[in-house]
Image: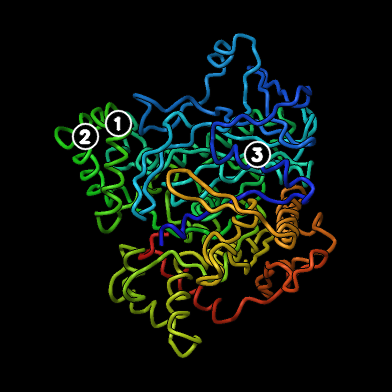
Amino acid sequence: MWLSFFAPFQDAIMSRAHQIAFDVARLALLLQCAVLPVFSSPGNVVDTGYAQYRGNQSFPNTVAYLGIPYAEPPLGELRFRAPLPLNTSRVAAEAGGKVIDATTYPNFCIQGSTGAGDAGGAGSEDCLKVNIYAPTGAKEGSNLPVLVYIHGGGYFYGNPANWPFDPWVHQSPNVVIVSVYYRLDAFGFLSIPEFSDSSIGDSNAGFSDQILALKWVNEHISSFGGDPQAVTINGQSAGGASVELHMVANTETNLFRGVIAQSVYRTPLAFPEQRVAQFQLFASTAGCGTGSIASQMACLRSASVSALARSQDFVSSTLSGYHLFQPVIDEKIFTDFPTRQLDNGKFKNVAVIVGSTTNETLAGGATIAAALQAYFPSMSNETAAAFVAEYPLSEFASEALQVQVATGEPSVVCGRDIIAAAVTTRNQAWTYRYNQPNPTQGGFGGTAHAAENWMMFQGINTGFNGSGVFTPMTPVETAFAEELIAYWLSFVRSGDPNTFKLARSPLWPQFTTSNKARIVLQQDQQNITTQSGIFSETQPALEGQRCSFIAEHVVPQQN
């Protein structure tokens, strides 16, 4: 399951005439250290006021500035703490007036195991960087709308180099796109009750990384031609959950104006008290299990990355209950469960696009009840039975479909209805069902989790420890990807996916309380590149009823 969960994403949308040129960029992404050809045009150098950065001219109209730091490196005493703002004076002094090379992807954050027999641990702690993709020559005063992308991977996996955005800007050279690296697994989400005293450590450090990245964008993206008042945040899976959490987080309200949430990972937000067993096993496995909490944290801060990586993998694979390192209710950033905050109107007033794939689920087990209780550890036998009763076999074509829907709606799919229903009471919402299987998976399991990432990011399938393999796309796949990107970037530019959609793409109907319309995203079924296979439908009444039931049972799900 985990490997399909984290088979994310890849780049999108270019004409076949540019395919050969982009193969060079594709190889660089896989090798991580290859240097792409750098043009001498002044259009690929940006001055932030404290440093100048030279980006890679990946297309004649597109520059990628890779590995731009947005925070101080979280090393030594800063490990397991909220990030510190970037010391721009330090960066300026180290640059010494020279242009800083930003033409290769940086080290990604320390990875966790996918649970598919691999060992995590690749990457670096010095990873709080962003990749910025901008039109050639974009500068202060260009005031281009901005997309900030937060990658998925369960909060313990993911490398932004596997989801490059050069072709997006190449297709639409009127936006700036920022992709964020943030700390993962135990490095980003270690938590215990004692972290309420920040002198010991900070819960949700990885999420605080995301917040600081948005603040850096607010302060500095204008140097790259972006408009800090026109930011849309986007993410898939754990990235989709992250953008939902930004909607309800106790943070500034002016850091973004729109949200695109893809396949929201409805993971439980544990209380720190529910993480004590996790911390104890993590510390002891790393050789830091004795003494006061302060002394254990001091030991963990001096432990090697390899020791901590082995420990986090061991904890995640052996502990039951709340065993994954993920966001918690810390009473600082998060004070309540997101579904309840959405229902109570306690969220940022922004327009949204939100959706899921047709056949996704993130919960697995011997039975539906067992799968739900493994996914939601606080769910009682009685509540699990009530959930199962909402999915009688008579309503499904097969038992396999019953299991997929009964586990998929609570774990991910109903995030679509929950978010859209809340937002539409005060703003605009558009929803979708993505219905194009990842072709490299042969349609096995239908349109599974992360299928759209293969299409939107140039045929990517990710592997272990930040790796990824790109496969060629057919002309009809490329044409479909162009439609997807046009919808996404139209929303970024105007707050409406229809304003700058492609001419062949149909109108995307708005979701309202009285008309729960959505669009079905799929390529043309006759393999014709000049026509669209996308169409509209209405959310089935039974799905809406089940999602309402799920939304009402917030406490056992802790989401």
Residue at the image point whose x is 43% and y is 59% from the top: 559
Residue at the image point whose x is 33% and y is 70% from the top: 365
Outermost residue toward the bottom? 394
Distance of label 1 from label 3 (alpha carbons): 43 Å
Q: Secondary structure at mark 1?
A: loop
Image quadrant assignment for residue 64: top right
For residue 25, the mark is 3
Residue type, label 1: Ile
Distance of label 2 from label 1 (alpha carbons): 8 Å
**Residue 38 placed where, x, y %?**
70, 26
Badge 1 density bin: few <14, some 14–19, many ≥20, Cα 10 Å: some
Q: Nearer the viewer, mark 2 or mark 3?
A: 3
Label 1 or label 3, whichever comes before in sequence order: 3
Going by the image, does 121 lie left or right of 228? left
Query: Looking at the image, can residue 347 be seen?
Result: no
Residue type, label 2: Ile
**Residue linked to disc 1:** 200
Going by the image, does 518 lie left or right of 369? right
Outermost residue toward the right? 503
On screen, 372 above or below 255? below
Residue type, label 3: Ala
